[in-house]
């Protein structure tokens, strides 16, 4: 494919938005300060053996006290938007609206006001994985009452911050936090239930999302005039061969990862047929009388359909997918899917063991989304790469410069050549932070953070000035007009 390696010159429209992303638990610290309640991530990281070297988010980048430093470095780079998340238990310590923590509420006001004063639009994620522990104690996402609690929390945030925040994201990557939190147990709350809780939790997350979107739509949209969406992710699944079986397996991979949430929201209020079909067959095969996949009522489907003003998409990497009957595997989420994934030895490696940079996969991923979900308005809400380093700074991050420019270039092709309606790009992450169970050595930042220094200085890597240049140029203008790339 000759298109794959060619570089496209061109720029984005003048209102294209460039940003960076973070998440509360990964950067804030102050885990028990000023009335914040514990979240499942506090519990998880405080349990020995769960994270790399037992590292926690107790202090991390200390953004709860140093958010002004964060704003300053974003301003330095010319950022247009900042995607951050609100820690639910900082606002509602036990997850319910019975008790509101005003110090936590004020923190986000100060952050938002500081951003607006610096000319940076806030893009706010309501849920980036840090469920209040008190709600987990009631069963967490497995309990359908969560939709009510999430809606109350969302309603509170829209009401409190909505005059200043115009871009809302209900959930970050439900595919990841249900699968990795409840099926493989690598993330909080660390459950390893096989092919059961994962589907029920996802079902409740979808209902919670729809409820919150309707709250925004019915009560706030006309006065606040913002947008409310969801962020979904998966790797790009490339068919390993041209065989019909492998092509079907690759599509199944995308449907189980992305369509699981995108199909109900953007298509018809219901799961993709291939998921319903597979989970039913596998459930019957193990001797159950009904599918492990819950069903939506007609009313619920109507409530779900069309509940997103834009699609937030996170892309990091690609995999090859081939068809494979999982005979030996115990029943569960993975056996349900009947495929095998591999990567290509020729793809470069990165500082994160789970990902190799595959820029051409980004354009294919965007085209697949565009074709399958009714050409939604898209914001890229995450894309990035890490180096692996305990403490040693690596300021000459050529790999990140290469990753960033090549992925932005593939996005430019998707926008210009494929006509996909992409409104913004968000690099993950502003600065090095707690990479969940992988700890602090997996560094995704444009800025290096010294976690040994109590002041947590943020120091720019070379990629920070390259991204600033891409932002100034709004893409990659022709060399004749000034810049040589
Ligand atoms: C995103 O997850 C997250 O939104 C963000 O918070 C995170 O810091 C960033 O990407 C970088 O990872 O699946 O067992 O191999 C991307 C998906 C899921 C990738 C968890 C790493 C590691 C555990 N991530 N995965 S496993």
Image (cartoon, rainbow, N blue to C red):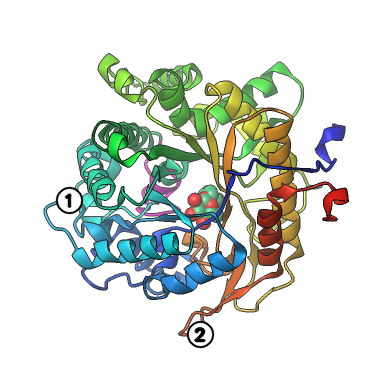
Residue at point 63%, 20% (across, down): 248
- What residue is rendered at 35% in x and 34% in y? 196
Cβ of mark 1 under 8 A from ligand 1: no
| Residue 189 drawn in magenta | yes
Q: Is 372 placed left or right of 287 in the picture?
A: right
Point out the image quarter for the C terminus: bottom right
* Residue 404 percent across, percent down from the top left: 69, 53
Report helix, strand or loop for mark 1: loop
Q: Earlier in the sequence, mark 1 or mark 2?
A: 1
Q: Which mark is residue 453?
A: 2
User: In the rendered view, would you say 299 is above or below 419?
Assistant: above
Q: Is residue 431 visible?
A: no
Q: Tell me the CA gap for discs 1 and 2.
A: 36 Å
Residue interval drawn in magenta? 180-194
Would you identify the image quadrant in which residue 93 lies?
bottom left
Q: Position of residue 226 (x, y in %)?
A: 38, 40
The reply to whether discs 1 and 2 touch (Cβ–Cβ < 8 Å) is no
> 353 or 84, which is in the foreground?
84
Residue 319 picture quarter: top right
Question: Which residue is at a point 88% across and 49% down the rendered structure image?
Answer: 480
Q: Is-magenta flag for residue 158?
A: no
Q: Would residue 186 be seen by someone viewing this image from the given angle?
A: yes
Tag shown at residue 96: 1
Q: Quadrant of the N terminus?
A: top right
Disc 2 secondary structure class: loop
């Amino acid at each position: 494919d000759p298109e794959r390696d060619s570089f496209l010159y061109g720029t984005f429209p003048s209102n294209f938005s460039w940003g960076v992303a973070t998440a509360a638990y990964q950067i804030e610290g102050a885990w028990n300060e000023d009335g914040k309640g514990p979240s499942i991530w506090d519990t998880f990281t405080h349990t020995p053996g769960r994270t790399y070297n037992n590292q926690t988010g107790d202090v991390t980048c200390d953004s709860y006290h140093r958010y002004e430093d964060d704003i300053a470095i974003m301003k330095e780079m010319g950022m247009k938007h900042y995607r951050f998340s609100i820690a639910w238990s900082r606002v509602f310590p036990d997850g319910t609206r019975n008790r509101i923590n005003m110090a936590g509420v004020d923190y986000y006001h100060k952050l938002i006001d500081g951003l607006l004063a610096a000319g940076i639009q806030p893009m706010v994620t309501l849920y980036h994985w840090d469920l209040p522990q008190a709600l987990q104690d009631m069963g967490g996402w497995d309990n359908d009452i969560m939709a009510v609690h999430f809606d109350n929390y969302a309603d509170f945030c829209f009401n409190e911050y909505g005059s200043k925040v115009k871009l809302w994201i209900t959930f970050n990557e439900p595919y990841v936090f249900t699968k990795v939190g409840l099926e493989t147990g690598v993330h909080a709350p660390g459950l390893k239930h096989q092919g059961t809780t994962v589907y029920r939790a996802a079902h409740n997350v979808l209902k919670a999302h729809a409820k919150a979107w309707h709250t925004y739509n019915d009560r706030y949209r006309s006065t606040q005039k913002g947008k409310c969406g969801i962020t979904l992710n998966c790797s790009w699944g490339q068919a390993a061969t041209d065989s019909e079986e492998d092509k079907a397996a690759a599509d199944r991979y995308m449907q189980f990862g992305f369509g699981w949430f995108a199909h109900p929201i953007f298509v018809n209020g219901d799961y993709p047929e291939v998921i319903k079909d597979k989970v039913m067959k596998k459930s019957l095969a193990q001797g159950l009388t009904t599918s492990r996949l819950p069903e939506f009522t007609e009313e619920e489907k109507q409530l779900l359909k069309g509940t997103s003003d834009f699609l937030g998409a996170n892309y990091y990497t690609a995999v090859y997918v081939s068809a494979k009957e999982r005979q030996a595997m115990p029943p569960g989420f993975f056996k349900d899917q009947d495929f095998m994934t591999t990567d290509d030895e020729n793809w470069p490696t990165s500082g994160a063991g789970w990902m190799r940079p595959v820029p051409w996969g980004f354009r294919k991923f965007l085209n697949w989304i565009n074709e399958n979900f009714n050409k939604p308005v898209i914001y890229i809400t995450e894309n990035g790469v890490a180096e692996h380093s305990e403490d040693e700074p690596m300021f000459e991050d050529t790999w990140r410069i290469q990753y960033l420019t090549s992925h932005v270039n593939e996005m430019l092709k998707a926008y210009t050549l494929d006509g996909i309606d992409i409104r913004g790009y968000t690099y993950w992450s502003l600065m090095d932070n707690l990479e969940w169970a992988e700890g602090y050595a997996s560094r995704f930042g444009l800025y290096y953070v010294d976690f040994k220094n109590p002041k947590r200085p943020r120091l720019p890597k070379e990629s920070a000035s390259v991204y600033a240049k891409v932002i100034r140029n709004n893409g990659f203008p022709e060399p004749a007009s000034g810049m040589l790339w």
